[in-house]
Amino acid sequence: MELLFIVLIAFFVSILFSMLGLGGAIIYAPIFFWLGLPLLTAIPMGLFLNAITTASASITYLKLRLVDTRIALPIIPTSILGALVGTYLTRRADTEILVILLSIILFLASIRILFFSKIGFSAGTTVKEQVVIGAAGGFLVGVISSLVGIGGGTFIMPLLLVLGFETKNAAATSAFIVTFISFSGFLFHLLFGQQQMDVSILLYAGVAAFIGAQAGSRLIFRRTSSRTIERMFALVLLFVAGKLLYGLL
């Protein structure tokens, strides 16, 4: 029964989050923990399914030429580097202050998207400027993601919107970037952690996530307006902000 629940969760979560350029790690880990899996198993499993979801969606988005690899490729290595730095700083930084500030930023960003359509301004008028800002922003995203324990896609998507990306291109490019970040995080956990992973659960849930992401990217993404995607993403930001603050209580 537990395996069936995990497979169903992976399928339906991947459908929704593949539309938003995310993988669903923010949902996977707590749900798997609530189902009785050890936290140190739930986290890497969530990262694995996160990577499968975004990788599956990226296949579709690359075929549709929605992924801007000129911006994505410089962000990927700096984000991974930032994640390593964030991991190092976790035991040395006052994360409570960071969480509060980050929650406020996410809340304001979600309100901005819901009621004013845009998240901010278009930073960088040339591709070169966008690459530089994106790479620097990717490093900060990696650091923050590691410090607060949230998948990088939650912050990559707003970064791309700030860089002036159209919503669907931002979601597609975010999915491509998050694939590499999530796989790296999963591998880091396997290399440095002591988790006992059930290969059969990973296999079945991974297949379900792959199929769900294909459905989300192929069927729904084409029929969903950019404005609807923006609003859905804003609600995810509100959820993340609430989850961060709840973790402080």
Image (spheres, grey):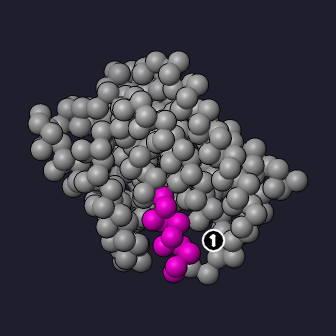
Please tell me which residue lies in front, 168 or 123: 168
Q: Where, by quadrant of the figure, is residue 141 drawn?
A: bottom left
Measured from the top left, where is residue 202 in percent x and y? 69, 61
Measured from the top left, where is residue 70 in percent x and y? 24, 44
Measured from the top left, where is residue 17 in percent x and y? 55, 39
Who's the residue at 33% across and 56% down the image?
A: 76
Is residue 69 left or right of 147 when viewed as pictured? left
Who's the residue at 53% across and 18% down the image?
A: 223
Q: Where, by quadrant of the figure, is residue 44 drawn?
A: bottom right
Please tell me which residue lies in front, 39 or 115: 39
Please identify the residue farthest to the front as the structure is shown.
63
Please identify the residue farthest to the right as the structure is shown.
1
Across the whole image, how many numbered discs are drawn on residues? 1
Specify the principal SS of the magenta part: helix
Who's the residue at 28% across and 32% down the image?
A: 165
- Give the answer, above or below, for where 111 lies relative to 24: above
- Give the answer, above or below, for where 62 lies relative to 194: above
Looking at the rendered structure, the secondary structure element under dot 1 is helix
Measured from the top left, where is residue 206 in percent x and y? 66, 53
Who's the residue at 35% across and 64% down the image?
A: 80
Residue 57 in sight here: yes
Residue 140 in sight here: no
Q: Residues within 10 Å of mark 1 (few under 14, many from 20)?
A: some
- The C terminus - image quarter: bottom right
Which residue is denoted by mark 1 in the rendering? 40
Q: Is residue 184 magenta?
A: yes
Is residue 41 left or right of 48 when viewed as pictured? right
Please tell me which residue lies in front, 192 or 27: 192
Image: magenta residue range: 182-192
Task: Identify which amino acid the numbered label 1 is placed on.
Answer: Leu
